[in-house]
Structure formats: C-alpha cells, structure tokens
Image (cartoon, rainbow, N blue to C red):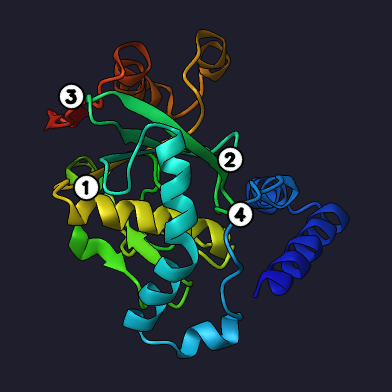
Amino acid sequence: MRRFAWVLAAFVVLLSGAWGLDLLAPYTRLLMQRLTLEPLLLPYPAPPSREQWKTMPASERLADVNRRLKPLLEKKLVESGLRLGNRVFIRLFKESGEFELWLQDAAGVWKHFRTHRIACFSGELGPKQREGDMQAPEGFYTVTAKQLNPASSYHLAFNIGYPNAFDLHHQRTGSLIMVHGDEVSVGCYAMTDAVIEEIYLLVSAALEKGQPEVPVHCFPFRFTDERMQKAKGETWFSFWENLREGYERFETKRVVPKITVENGRYR
C-alpha cells in the first residue's frame, strides 16, 4: 500500500506538470511534503508484516503491541518523569507535518513527550467541509474509549470525533476521520505503523486510567504573528483567528482549554 502511494504521488506530479492540472496542485504539494519528511526512529521491535497483522484479531493485536512496546515505553516515560496512564493531549500541525504528544505528570504539569512526523494527509490548509472533499479537519476534537479501533484495516486507529458541535453548526458533513497507521490517507491523519502503535498505547492507557477524553487539536500551522500576517486575506483567516485563541491558551499558560461552541464560534 505504501509503495502504491509513492507511485501514485509520482504519477500525479508528472500528470499535473505535463498537462497543467492546477486543480491537483494542493493535493500533490502536501502529499509530496509528507513523503520527504523523515520519521522519528523508535526503539521498539518491528510490528508483524502487514499481511500477518490483517489476520490477527483485535485482542491478539493489542497483546502483541503491549509485549513489544510497553517495557521500553514505560522506561522512556519514567526517564521523562511520566508514567503510562498519565493524561494525554495531542496537537497536530498540517503545514509542518508535526504530531505532538503531551502528557500530564503527577503534579499536573503538561510535559512534551514526543513529536512525530505525520506520514500523510490529503487536502490543503483549511477545514474539512463535506463528505468526500479529501480534506483533513482543523479544529478542536476529542477521543473517548469508544472511538478506539484496534481492529482497523489501517493497523490501529482512533476516531478524532469529526464532525464536532462547531462542524455541525456550520453544516459540515463527513465521518470516520481517524488517526491511523498504514501511511495512506484520503482525509485522515496517517502515521507509520510503528508510530501509531506508540500513540495508540498512550491514548488507550490514559483512557483506561480515567481520563474521560483525550483532546486532539488540529491546526493548519503554528499561530505566530509572522504566520498570521502572511495568512491575511486568505479564505479561512477569521476561522484561524478563532483557532488561535485555543492555541495561545496552551502556549502561554500550559493549560488545555475547555472548548465550547457559541454562536458558531469556538469559545
């Protein structure tokens, strides 16, 4: 599947260049950006082959992931003053292709644990608006235990909760938007199989230990003054200003904001 994605990306590049298909440019640009980013090397034993993995029931998958990852992950967490089961907070940045994992320590302080590279997502900067538009969402989402999917066709997965109350207010459609493995996406945020295993283990452990929901904040980019100045005049500028409020709450105070929706805006 990964090899097919690379071949498809190369074909789209050639096609758009030779025939001048500007319509494909946003998808081509972002897909090729994902392919050139180097993933973070992890110390865990490699997962089974994809052919073998697809034949394994969910219980065997989870047992295998715990066997291969848990001892090394717990050791790394202790070195960082953390433990498996600590509360988790996730931030994603499309433009830089970054997936941040934050964990809350015993004193209630949020600590940055890891930044992974997003392997692939489709679309361009801006929110998802409708089913089939190939856009990865932007906004404030949450993951509960019922949104975990260890039986996913894309290695492991969890649903981020799109559409949320904000999306529904704006009559946005779509479903089954995941963070998953397999490195291929048509609207989801795809990771490598090795990376999604670590993410899944951290998220599921936090939910099992009592965290009611894991916040997942999806941003187009980091909301610096310089980047927002560059974004002035773009279609989604007002929407991005609204997202920036939540972004800055965590940046300045290290407090994960509680998000509500009032009059069609995040609050």
- 148 displayed left or right of 155: left
Which type of secondary structure does the marked residue at label 4 adopt?
loop
| Kind of residue at disc 4 | Pro
Disc 4 vs disc 2: Cβ atoms closer than 8 Å? no
Q: Distance between the residues labelled 4 and 2?
A: 22 Å
* Picture residue at 29% right of the left edge, 13% below the top: 253
Q: Could you say which disc has been placed on residue 43 in the image?
A: 4
Badge 4 crowding class, 10 Å Cα cut-off, few under 14, some 14 to 19, many 20 or more, is: few
Q: How far apart are marks 2 and 1 (CA)?
A: 23 Å
Q: Distance between the residues labelled 2 and 3?
A: 26 Å
What number of labels is visible? 4
Q: How far apart are marks 4 and 3 (CA)?
A: 40 Å
- Position of 4 relative to 55 (above/below): above
Disc 2 vs disc 1: Cβ atoms closer than 8 Å? no
Q: Nearer the viewer, mark 2 or mark 3?
A: 2
Which type of secondary structure does the marked residue at label 3 adopt?
loop
Residue extending farthest bottom: 55
Badge 2 crowding class, 10 Å Cα cut-off, few under 14, some 14 to 19, many 20 or more, is: many
- Position of 58 relative to 136 (above/below): below
| Kind of residue at disc 3 | Arg
User: x, y percentage for residue 256?
Assistant: 25, 27
Which tag, 2 or 1, sits closer to the chain's start? 2
Q: Nearer the viewer, mark 4 or mark 2?
A: 4
Which tag, 4 or 3, sits closer to the chain's start? 4
Disc 3 vs disc 1: Cβ atoms closer than 8 Å? no
Disc 4 vs disc 3: Cβ atoms closer than 8 Å? no
Residue indicated by mark 3: 267
Q: Could you say which disc has been placed on residue 251 in the image?
A: none
Q: Distance between the residues labelled 3 and 1?
A: 13 Å
Quarter of the image that includes the N terminus: bottom right
